[in-house]
C-alpha cells in the first residue's frame, strides 16, 4: 500500500505520540509498504528527507519548543499542510491516510476525505476531558469540528479501553478499534540497577510527580530522578526547595533518547501516578528496561502493565510511599516484577504485531469505500 501519514509532531519533535508514529511508519516500510509523513518544520530540520525508508515532509510552521506545542502553533501546521496536500495529492495516489490526533491534524484530513480515505488514531489530549491541564475551553469551542472529523473517518482507533470510553462519552456511538502502542523491546537492556526511582514525562500537574516528591520525605537510600520539561516545572522546583529535598530529588530536564534510555536501564523503580493517561509509552520503555513499576490503577496505565506492577490510587501520597518502600525493601520483588514486565512487552506489544493490526484496518477501510 501507499500510505500517507499525518502528525503535527514527528521525532525529534514532541512527546509520546511522535515516536509512536515514527516506529509504526518504519515497521510498515519493513513490511513492504510505502510511507510519506507530513509533519511540522522546526529550526534547522530538512524540509524533506528519507529516514529508515520513510519519506518525511516538514511544512512551514511556527514552533518555539522541541518538546511541546501550543494550539496556535498547531494551526500554523494545519494551514501549511492544507496547501501542501493540495499539491501532493495531485502527484501521489495514496491508498489510505493514517492521521494521528482528531485535533489538529484531523481537520486537515477531513478536508480531503473524498480524495483519500483516512483513519484517525486518538492519543489523549485530542479527546475532551482527558487532559485537565490543557485545552478544556478549546475542546468546547471546536467540538463541532471534531465531530465532523470523526464522522468522515473510515475508522477510529484508540490505544486503550480507557480512552475509548472518553471518546464514547463525548461523541456518542462511534465504532472504535483498540490498537495498543508498540515498542522495540530488544533495544532496551536491564543494566546494573541503582538505588534510583525514575519518572520520565512531560511536566504536567496531572502526572502526579508532586505526590512522589512528597512521599520522598519519608524515604532514605534512594534518589528520585524526574526527566522531562513542561509548564509544571516551577511548581515542582518550589516544592523540592520547600521540602528541602534537593539532595535526593533531581529535575534532569529534556533528555535525548540515548540519555533517557540510560536512565531507564539504571533505574530500579519507575513511577507514574497520573490522574489521566491513555497508553503511556514511557511505561512500556520502563518495562522493557526491567524496571519495577508503580502506576495508577484508574487510568490506561493499568492496561499497559497488566499484573506486572504495583498499582496505586492517583493523588495518594501515602499509598505511593507505601509502594515505594515495599519495592525498596524487597529486591527479589523488584527483580520479579521487572522480569515479568519485560516478558509482557515482548509478548504483547511488538511493532510487527501492531502494524499488522493497522494494515487489516486499512484494508477494511478500502473495502468499505
Image (spheres, helix red, strand yellow):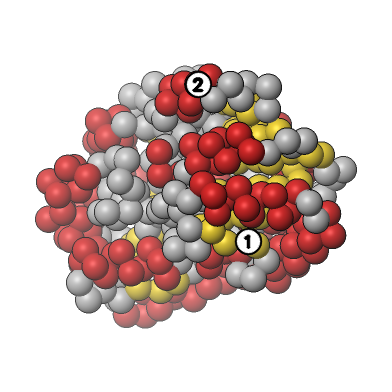
Q: Residues within 10 Å of mark 1 (few under 14, many from 20)?
A: many
Of pointers 1 and 2, the one earlier in the residue sequence: 2
Q: Position of residue 9 (x, y in %)?
A: 44, 40
> Residue at image x 46%, y 44%?
207
> Residue at image x 33%, y 69%?
165
Q: Position of residue 298 (x, y in %)?
A: 44, 63
* 97 relative position to 54: left or right: left
- Residue indicated by mark 2: 242
Closest to the observer: 108 or 245?
245
Q: Residues within 10 Å of mark 2 (few under 14, many from 20)?
A: few
For residue 231, say whether it is visible. yes
Label 2 element class: helix
Numbered badge on residue 215: none
Closest to the observer: 155 or 4?
155
> Residue at image x 54%, y 58%?
312
* 246 relative position to 220: left or right: left
Check the image and report above or below for 57 versus 152. Answer: above
For residue 81, say whether it is visible. no
Label 1 element class: strand
Q: Position of residue 64 (x, y in %)?
A: 39, 21
Q: Quadrant of residue 323?
A: bottom right
Of the 4 image quadrants, the one containing the C terminus is: bottom left
Whole-Å distance between the Cαs marked 1 and 2? 29 Å
- Residue indicated by mark 1: 310
Amino acid at each position: 500500500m501507499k500510505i500517507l501519514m499525518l502528525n503535527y509532531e514527528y521525532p525529534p519533535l514532541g512527546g509520546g505520540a511522535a515516536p509512536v508514529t515514527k516506529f509504526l511508519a518504519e515497521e510498515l516500510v519493513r513490511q513492504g509498504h510505502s510511507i510519506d509523513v507530513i509533519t511540522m518544520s522546526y529550526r534547522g530540520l530538512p524540509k524533506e528527507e528519507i529516514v529508515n525508508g520513510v519519506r518525511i515532509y516538514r511544512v512551514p510552521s511556527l514552533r518555539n519548543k522541541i518538546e511541546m506545542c501550543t494550539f496556535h502553533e498547531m494551526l500554523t501546521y494545519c494551514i501549511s499542510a492544507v496547501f501542501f496536500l493540495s499539491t501532493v495529492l495531485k502527484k501521489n495516489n495514496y491508498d489510505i491516510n493514517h492521521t494521528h490526533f482528531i485535533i489538529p491534524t484531523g481537520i486537515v484530513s477531513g478536508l480531503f476525505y473524498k480524495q483519500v480515505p483516512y483513519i484517525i488514531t486518538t492519543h489523549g489530549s485530542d479527546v475532551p476531558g482527558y487532559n485537565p491541564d490543557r485545552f478544556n475551553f478549546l475542546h468546547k469551542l471546536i467540538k463541532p469540528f471534531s465531530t465532523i472529523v470523526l464522522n468522515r473517518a473510515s475508522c477510529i482507533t484508540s490505544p486503550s479501553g480507557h480512552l475509548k470510553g472518553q471518546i464514547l462519552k463525548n461523541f456518542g456511538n462511534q465504532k472504535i478499534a483498540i490498537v495498543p502502542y508498540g515498542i522495540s523491546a530488544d533495544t532496551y537492556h536491564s543494566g546494573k540497577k541503582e538505588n534510583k526511582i525514575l519518572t520520565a514525562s512531560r511536566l504536567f500537574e496531572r502526572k502526579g510527580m508532586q505526590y512522589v516528591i512528597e512521599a520522598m520525605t519519608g524515604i532514605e537510600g534512594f534518589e528520585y530522578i524526574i526527566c522531562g520539561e513542561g509548564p509544571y516545572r516551577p511548581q515542582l522546583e518550589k516544592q523540592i526547595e520547600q521540602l528541602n529535598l534537593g539532595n535526593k530529588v533531581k529535575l534532569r530536564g529534556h533528555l535525548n533518547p540515548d540519555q533517557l534510555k540510560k536512565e531507564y536501564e539504571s533505574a530500579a523503580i519507575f513511577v507514574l501516578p497520573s490522574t489521566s493517561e491513555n497508553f503511556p509509552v514511557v511505561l512500556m520503555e520502563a518495562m522493557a528496561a526491567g524496571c519495577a513499576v508503580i502506576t495508577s490503577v484508574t487510568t490506561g496505565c493499568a492496561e499497559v502493565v497488566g499484573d506486572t506492577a504495583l498499582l496505586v490510587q492517583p493523588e495518594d501520597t501515602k499509598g505511593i510511599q507505601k509502594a515505594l518502600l515495599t519495592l525498596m525493601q524487597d529486591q527479589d520483588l523488584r527483580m520479579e516484577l521487572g522480569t515479568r514486565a519485560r516478558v509482557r512487552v515482548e509478548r504483547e506489544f511488538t511493532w510487527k504485531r501492531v502494524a499488522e493490526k493497522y494494515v487489516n484496518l486499512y484494508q477494511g477501510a478500502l473495502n468499505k469505500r
